[in-house]
Amino acid sequence: MYVNLNGFSTNVIVKRKAIKNIYFKWENDDLVVTCNTYLSHAEIEKLIKKNSKSLQNLKKRTPKSDLKSNEMYFLGEKYVVEYDGVSRTYIDGNKIISKNEAELQKFLNYQCTVIFNSRLERLKVQFKDLPNFSLRIRHMTTRWGVCNTKSMTITLNSELIKKDVSLIDYVIIHELCHFKHMNHSSEFWSEVEKYYPYHKLARKMLKESQND
């Protein structure tokens, strides 16, 4: 599909998905449009011409490098991160597309809240006599999780969002078991093993990832 944009014939690549909004980005001299499955070519062309000035300005700000800046892990899978200056953060295959680093971080923070709370609710029903406690999430440099019986809180490291769900589950179970044993005694590890038999492997994987 070609569209006349400010006197120049521009190649437009259309990617249709089950989304409500429409997103534009430049890949070198191609304009990539990600839109709803039912949006017609005529409607796309109309929107491109309506936003021609903004799209030209976006093209000037877009480096000729296909916008690939780095790689990151999300829930144990490796993704290429691309910043296009306009898009709300979304996952497309093996890519995470975002407006900028700040918006990507907002996305990750939101995912931490949703996923960590969901896993916690799923796991804690296996335990008996848990006290009332709250969940906190923050970035930590030396620990994956903390159980504080004074404040009745469990704190999870936001970096866990990069790990496989099974490792997130292990850290949650580890901290829940601390409500019964506030140490790392043999009794504590026996308690952990009831809910997570492969805790030694999980600990090894987390330790190795800290050294990467």
Image (cartoon, rainbow, N blue to C red):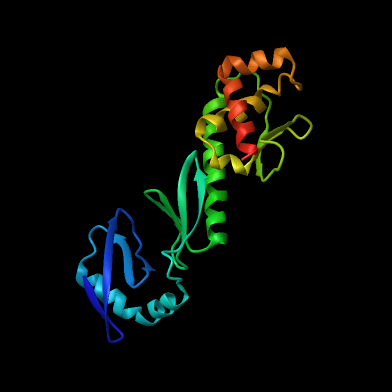
Quadrant in which residue 37 is drawn: bottom left
Residue plotted at (53% across, 60% down): 103
User: x, y percentage for residue 6?
Assistant: 31, 85
Residue plotted at (72% across, 39% down): 142
User: x, y percentage for residue 159?
Assistant: 61, 43
Q: Tell me if 12 is positioned left or right of 111 in this view.
A: left
With respect to residue 146, does 60 lie above or below?
Answer: below
Residue plotted at (21% across, 69% down): 41
Q: Tell me if 207 is positioned left or right of 11 in this view.
A: right
With respect to residue 36, does 29 lie above or below?
Answer: below
Looking at the figure, which quarter contains the C terminus? top right
Looking at the figure, which quarter contains the N terminus? bottom left
With respect to residue 140, does 64 lie above or below?
Answer: below
Q: Tell me if 175 is positioned left or right of 54 in this view.
A: right
Quadrant in which residue 20 is drawn: bottom left
Between 23 and 204, the residue placed more toward the observer is 204
Residue plotted at (32% across, 80% down): 50
User: x, y percentage for residue 200?
Assistant: 61, 21
